[in-house]
Amino acid sequence: MKVYETNKVVRYLRKRNIIKPYLKAKSYFEAGHPQAIRLKLLKPKQQKEYQFRINTKYRARGFYKEDGFLVTSISDHQ
């Protein structure tokens, strides 16, 4: 499954210098290993918003689309 990012997400990753850990988590996601990045469905479940772990500090949030997964935001988990 392909993972896409918005321009806002790319700027956030560059500003905080977390591109390398994000690309590693993205590769696990695309390879079909959601348990390695701790993919989980967020509440309320009707919105179908997911998050996955980039590293211990940052999480990526997004939605499944027809052609893949769209990452809409990165959040500081601490």
Image: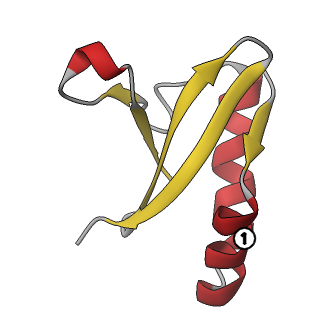
Q: Quadrant of the N terminus?
A: top right
Query: Are there few (<14), some (14-19), or many (20+) residues within 10 Å of tag 1?
Result: some
Q: Please name the amino acid that badge 1 sits on.
A: Ile
Residue 14: image quadrant is bottom right
Left or right: 76, with 5 as reference point: left
- Residue name at image x 52 percent, y 38 percent: 62
**Image position, residue 30 (x, y; %):** 75, 28
Above or below residue 64? Residue 29 is below
Depth check: give the residue in front, 74 or 27: 74
- Is residue 55 visible in the rendered structure shown here? no
User: Is residue 25 in view from this perspective?
Assistant: yes
Measured as percent of width and height from the top left, residue 24 is found at: 71, 52
Q: Position of residue 17 (x, y in %)?
A: 66, 85
Colour scheme employed for the rendering of this structure: secondary structure
Q: Where is residue 33 in the image (x, y as percent from the top left)?
A: 60, 23
Report whether 32 appears left or right of 75. right
**Which residue lies at the image location 66% right of the left edge and 59% below the top edge?**
22
Q: Tell me what residue is drawn at x 28 percent, y 65 percent.
A: 77
Q: Name the residue under label 1.
A: 19
How many marks are shown on the rendered structure? 1
Above or below: residue 39 compared with residue 76: above
* The C terminus sits in image quarter: bottom left
Q: SS for tag 1?
A: helix
